[in-house]
Image (cartoon, coloured by chain):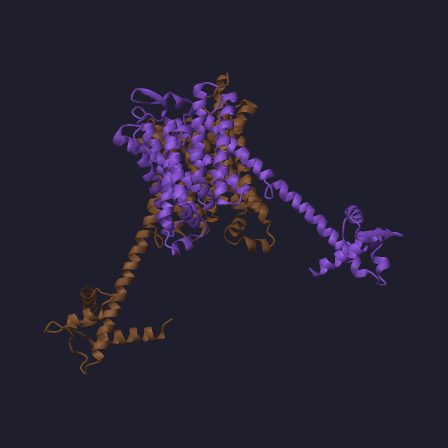
């Protein structure tokens, strides 16, 4: 592994972790699409700020992006509050407009801005190591790393300081309001944080893949764990794994690094969707099948119990006709009887099915409980 | 007029204009249903999810024919929608997270494939990236024919199942109870939406295509409360913005088509939100003002009536300061008195005080009676 390769992975990991942290709150607060809106509309802020300061590396750009993010959120809320459009439509109206102005400004003045529409969408992670940060003449590493590391620390600090408040505002906004925790203020602070993170990540992975890094790892973590603190940690870890594995896949295919990071984040979600303990598709299917068998067995026991010792018993509890009484498929009935026999709940005598003591107890329990 | 002349004479511009107008109209129609069904952002997911489909279609067939690429796009967009629906159905993941996830991950896969294709040693890959921001200028007559054919098909189907779609939008439970196959109607409507989005990708691009779905419909919603009218207006707005945007970007250099069309749409939306009768912001503001003024006038008249009842002489004048004191809470005494005098309900006496005229007395009694009945 060469030095630039190591540096690219380092930056990718820092970007992914920075995105996953505020993303966790977006996912929990059902505002995932807000990251889409913000990551698009900050382009407008960056371009406008660039025209003012004429310097793409100015920290002023980050401030402008944060303001644009908050502006986007306020515009969405303003539109929503007129009662003329629903919230989802308000999002869908706001960010394309701001993004379009940004794109048009970039393409009209492409000569003077070191931004082009491709890098807006794709990011330039592969070039990040070429832009070095020098302190007093010493090369101390790629500039993007320090920018993103700073943003990551800011995110960690914000979440650490306001952990309790964020938790309460996320899970019970009204209680947070009653207790005086200013959920509105936290909301805008979080949005500003998302914007700052998006503008930092924007350079590296482009505007749309910021969304992937903000949403996919937390959504995956949401399927895996039940505690906020764990969800934050797992999201960050999943982000880092997507970053490193994505880098190497891009290396092999000679394709977009950001794109394969997003693909890996998606793949990890796919894996959790299938195999998450208790919540994945496999677990759901297994549970359903198991419940079906358990239910069928209980039905059988109760049926036998109901007719035990009655004149109809001879007719009702005969093995060959059992499936008709319970309205089951013939083969299914055979398998249920076989399974119940293996567990010592029933026994067959002269083609008749009799409950054992255990079976009788189980039937009684099922009817009472 | 000169521009129009050029437009009719210029073959390329005519092609581009026709294509953009048509796809704007089709998306306006389907967008109306999407917005009414609270699926505004589904269009965003579909259009982004279409990108890997375009790349895969090219990788598998090596063809750049519009129809092949659009089929790939439609398949991928459809699969993306299916993922969103199934993730929401099977897990506790919410709709917005599922949308954001599918949108960005599919787009990421699309980018991997596109960059992979770009570095392939064959020369024919150029031009796939026009699907990112759209390039109306690359529309050929053949493409417009494809757009026209697919779009016409979509519109015909919408007309054929108009009644069912209407029920699906406004009362799906009732529709189900009547025995309509809601699931299949849902699938059909989404398939039509996917088709209409896909035919716009070449012109508007995957990034901004969602605006073509949401904006015309959101604007049209302000002008009417009837589905038929809304769909028609939405189609008109879509066509207008599509045509204007595509033509402007074709005649001006370095003006990407998608963003230009979106700006045209934004203007239409803003105007609609502000001035649309009944719902528009300005209209509402004016109505509230009129209502408030009317209430103030009635309140002053009632105050005068109360004062008159305390005197034997109904023509007895009352100083304005008394009325002002009584009107704390509603205000506007001076203006209201002017309005009342114009209508002949009050008069100013010689010593500068105000009193009810006989007609004013009658009016005040009538209003009091109405208040008494109350709702």
Task: Identify which residue is drawn at 10% across, 73% down.
Answer: B351
Q: Nearer the viewer, residue A72 or B334?
A: A72
Vertical relation: B329 (above or below) B103: below
Furthest-bottom residue in this view: B312
Q: Nearer the viewer, residue B294 or A75?
A: A75
Number of numbered discs present?
0
Q: Is A319 displayed left or right of A82 in the figure?
A: right
In the rendered image, which quarter contains the C terminus of chain B? bottom left
Q: Nearer the viewer, residue B14 or B219?
A: B219
Q: Position of residue B93 (x, y in %)?
A: 52, 44
- The quarter holding residue A57 reads top left
Task: Identify which residue is drawn at 29% across, 56% down.
Answer: B286
Q: Position of residue B102 (x, y in %)?
A: 51, 37
- Can see residue B113? yes
In the rendered image, which quarter contains the N terminus of chain B? top left
Q: Is A303 displayed left or right of A256 in the figure?
A: right
- Can see residue B28? no
Q: Position of residue A179 (x, y in %)?
A: 39, 55
**Chain in brown in the render:** B
Q: Is A196 displayed left or right of A219 in the figure?
A: left
Vertical relation: B161 (above or below) A12: below
Q: Nearer the viewer, residue B361 or A231?
A: A231
Task: Identify which residue is drawn at 60% across, 44% down.
Answer: A278
Task: Identify which residue is drawn at 65% across, 43% down.
Answer: A285
**Chain in purple in the render:** A
């Amino acid at each position: 592994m060469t030095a630039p390769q190591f540096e690219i992975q380092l930056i990718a990991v820092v970007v992914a972790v920075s995105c996953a942290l505020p993303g966790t709150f977006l996912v929990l607060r059902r505002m995932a699409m807000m990251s889409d809106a913000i990551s698009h509309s900050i382009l407008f802020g960056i371009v406008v700020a660039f025209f003012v300061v004429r310097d793409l590396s100015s920290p002023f750009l980050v401030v402008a992006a944060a303001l644009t993010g908050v502006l986007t959120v306020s515009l969405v809320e303003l539109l929503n509050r007129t009662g003329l459009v629903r919230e989802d439509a308000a999002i869908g109206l706001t960010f394309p407009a701001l993004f379009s102005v940004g794109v048009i400004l970039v393409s009209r003045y492409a000569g003077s801005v070191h931004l082009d529409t491709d890098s807006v969408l794709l990011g330039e992670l592969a070039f990040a190591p070429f832009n070095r940060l020098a302190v007093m003449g010493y090369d101390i590493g790629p500039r993007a790393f320090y920018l993103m590391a700073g943003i990551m620390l800011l995110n960690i600090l914000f979440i650490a300081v306001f952990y309790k408040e964020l938790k309460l505002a996320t899970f019970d906004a009204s209680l947070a309001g009653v207790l005086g925790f200013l959920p509105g203020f936290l909301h805008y602070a979080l949005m500003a944080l998302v914007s700052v993170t998006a503008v930092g990540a924007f350079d590296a992975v482009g505007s749309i893949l910021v969304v992937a890094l903000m949403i996919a790892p937390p959504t995956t973590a949401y399927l895996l764990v039940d505690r906020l603190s764990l969800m934050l940690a797992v999201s960050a870890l999943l982000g880092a794994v997507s970053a490193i594995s994505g880098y190497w896949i891009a290396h092999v295919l000679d394709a977009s690094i950001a794109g394969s990071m997003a693909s890996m984040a998606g793949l990890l979600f796919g894996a959790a969707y299938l195999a998450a303990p208790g919540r994945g598709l496999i677990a759901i299917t297994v549970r359903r099948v198991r419940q079906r068998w358990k239910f069928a067995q209980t039905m059988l026991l109760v049926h036998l119990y109901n007719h035990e010792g009655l004149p109809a018993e001879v007719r009702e509890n005969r093995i060959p006709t059992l499936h008709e009484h319970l309205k089951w498929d013939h083969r299914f009935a055979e398998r249920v009887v076989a399974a119940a026999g293996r567990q010592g709940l029933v026994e067959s005598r002269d083609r008749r099915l009799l409950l054992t003591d255990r079976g009788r107890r189980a039937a009684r329990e099922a009817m009472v409980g | 007029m000169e521009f129009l002349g050029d437009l009719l004479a210029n073959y390329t511009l005519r092609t581009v204009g026709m294509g953009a107008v048509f796809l704007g109209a089709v998306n306006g129609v389907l967008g109306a249903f999407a917005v009414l069904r609270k699926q505004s952002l589904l269009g965003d997911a579909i259009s982004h999810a279409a990108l890997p489909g375009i790349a895969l279609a090219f990788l598998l067939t090596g063809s750049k024919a519009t129809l092949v690429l659009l089929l790939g796009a439609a398949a991928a967009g459809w699969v993306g929608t299916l993922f969103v629906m199934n993730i929401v159905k099977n897990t506790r993941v919410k709709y917005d997270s599922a949308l954001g996830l599918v949108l960005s991950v599919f787009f990421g896969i699309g980018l991997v494939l596109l960059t992979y294709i770009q570095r392939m040693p064959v020369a024919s890959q150029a031009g796939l990236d026009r699907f990112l921001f759209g390039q109306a200028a690359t529309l050929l007559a053949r493409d417009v024919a494809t757009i026209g054919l697919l779009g016409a098909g979509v519109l015909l189907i919408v007309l054929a199942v108009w009644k069912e779609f209407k029920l699906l939008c406004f009362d799906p439970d009732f529709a189900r109870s009547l025995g309509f196959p809601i699931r299949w109607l849902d699938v059909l409507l989404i398939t039509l939406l996917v088709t209409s989005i896909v035919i716009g990708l070449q012109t508007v691009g995957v990034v901004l295509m969602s605006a073509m779905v949401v904006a015309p419909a959101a604007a049209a919603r302000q002008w009417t409360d009837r589905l038929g009218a809304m769909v028609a207006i939405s189609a008109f707005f879509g066509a207008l913005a599509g045509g204007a945007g595509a033509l402007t970007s074709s005649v001006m250099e370095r003006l990407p088509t998608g963003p230009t069309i979106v700006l045209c749409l934004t203007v239409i939306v803003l105007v609609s939100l502000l001035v649309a009768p009944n719902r528009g912001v300005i209209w509402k503001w004016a109505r509230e003002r009129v209502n408030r003024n009317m209430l103030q006038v009635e309140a002053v008249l009632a105050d005068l009536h109360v004062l008159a009842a305390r005197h034997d002489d109904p023509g007895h004048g009352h100083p304005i300061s008394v009325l002002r004191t009584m009107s704390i809470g509603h205000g506007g005494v001076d203006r209201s008195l002017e309005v009342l005098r114009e209508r002949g309900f009050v008069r100013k006496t010689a010593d500068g005080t105000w009193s009810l005229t006989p007609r004013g007395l009658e009016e005040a009694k009538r209003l009091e009676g109405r208040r008494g009945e109350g709702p």
